[in-house]
Image: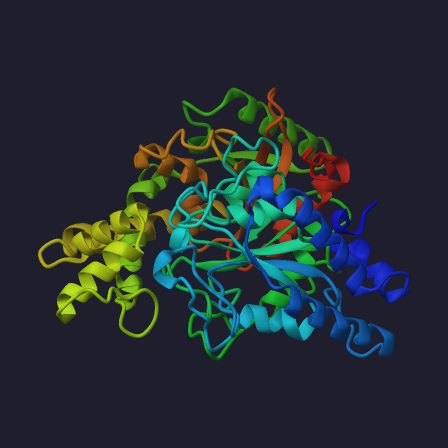
Amino acid sequence: MELNKQTIEQLHKQLIEKKIKPSDILDSVYKRVESVDSKVKAYLMLTKDLAYDMAKKAGDRIMKNDNVTDLTGIPIGIKDNMCLEGFNTTCASKMLEGYKPPYTATALKNLIEAGAIFTGKLNMDEYAFGSSTENSAYQTTCNPWDLSRVPGGSSGGSAAAVAADMCVAALGSDTGGSIKQPAGLCNVTGLRPTYGRVSRYGLIAFGSSLDQIGPMTKTVKDNAILLKYLAGIDKKDSTSAPIDVPDYDSNLRKDIKGMVIGLPKEYMIDGMDKQVKAKIMEAVKLLEANGATIQEISLPYTDYALDVYYVVAPAEASSNLARFDGVQYGLRDTSADNLIDMYKKSRRAGFGKETKRRIMLGTYVLSSGYYDAYYKKAQKVRTLIKNDFDKAFEKVDVILTPTSPTTAFKIGEKAADPLTMYLSDIFTIAPNMAGLPGISVPAGFDAAGLPIGMQVLAAPFAEQKIYDLTNFYQTKTDWHEKRANL
């Protein structure tokens, strides 16, 4: 099997046995990028010089057996909203075209210390506003399973790159479902960690009470390995949690006997694709046959999650994006003859339609006279949503749902209807509002050969339970081993 198609686990074994070098893996990855990225359009930029320099350093570490980790020599793609000193970080926006941050995100620093290699910056919806990667100012990424369809979003470039074997793993960020939803649509494994599990320092902010960086990989085991190095407290991020990071991959259970899985009745909604529902129930039966207990639960405030999210998230986005005004960095309109005009013209030219839509919505709900009616009320309902989950986790170990109500839709199909687009994240938004960890793993395909994702959630900082269940599921199924034919 070509090196770019292998897992972190498989490559690490060959590296420490000195059968291959990090540069061999990188050669294989870049050969694949050259072959298929003109069709998929996952990368916004490649960082080849940096990557080969990192590969040489990783090779030296391995030869000297000096602080070799599971990630030493492993090529990883980066979503383009994570700061890497001296390299373009655009958030797929014209507003930040050419911006080179003077510092590196903590999550990326952690990977550098582990000896990982960065292959390049991956496409996304502008500022992570979207569910399809159609809102990028630069290009629309295609789903490797059907190039006429979306890969999901906003981490669509990351999901597509992993699915097309153009990196061994990738980093995404998840605010309302931006890791889990594209992972589900592209047949990869994507975890959104508990809010506070991974430092947000150096992640260009969308919604500060929601954003989390997370791993997107080919298997659950790889995902557990990557999270182990990403996670941990960071003095530069006051929201990062002072909680020890488990050795997730070494602690994986061999069986799931006695695990209690909750099935929320509110998630089996009208309008959900029948084939999606059938595959999820097939997975439930398999897990039950192997010793898990299935229990129906209720999360009554689920119905309000989408409404709450589209008050809270745009409000925080409006506040965060106020810094992009053409003064310190980013696009500046030079035709303006006064400061206010320069602000207006720069932001009009720099931001895309969806970004403007969310800024205006967020500014409205935070404006004088409306704050209590919208933002404050939404935060109260958010607490009720969290309480639903807290009560559920008193009875169950994990909660299992579909990742998305449908498989990948056609490019352009929902672009003119933002409300329909927002419904793509209906199953991922509620747990995110509660700050919960959640994963999407491959659970099969529909009749058209499009991937179906299964979402598994756990209580805060209980990622180990998620990994235990889904890793066991992957030992009993081979959906995650299927590859798109490009």
Q: Is residue 368 left or right of residue 157?
A: left
Q: As displayed, is residue 188 above or below residue 269?
A: below
Q: Nearer the viewer, residue 347 or 400?
A: 347
In the orientation shown, which residue stands out farthest toward the front? 335
In the image, residue 450 lies at what x, y percent?
59, 28
Q: Nearer the viewer, residue 436 or 44?
A: 44
Number of disc labels = 0
Q: How is the image coloured?
A: rainbow
Please give the name of the residue rendered at 19% of the width and 56% of the height, measured from the top-left corner: 363
**Residue 454 showing in the rendered view:** no
Q: As displayed, is residue 99 above or below residue 188?
A: below
Q: Is residue 393 left or right of residue 270?
A: right
In the image, residue 155 lies at what x, y percent?
50, 49
Please give the name of the residue rendered at 30% of the width and 59% of the height, measured from the top-left corner: 316
Q: Quadrant of the N terminus?
A: top right
Please give the name of the residue rendered at 34% of the width and 67% of the height, measured from the top-left corner: 330
**Residue 127 showing in the rendered view:** yes
In the orientation shown, which residue stands out farthest toward the left? 369
Q: Quadrant of the C terminus?
A: top right
Q: Is residue 459 left or right of residue 8?
A: left
In the image, residue 465 lies at what x, y percent?
63, 51
Q: Is residue 236 left or right of residue 95?
A: right
In the image, residue 428 lies at what x, y percent?
45, 43
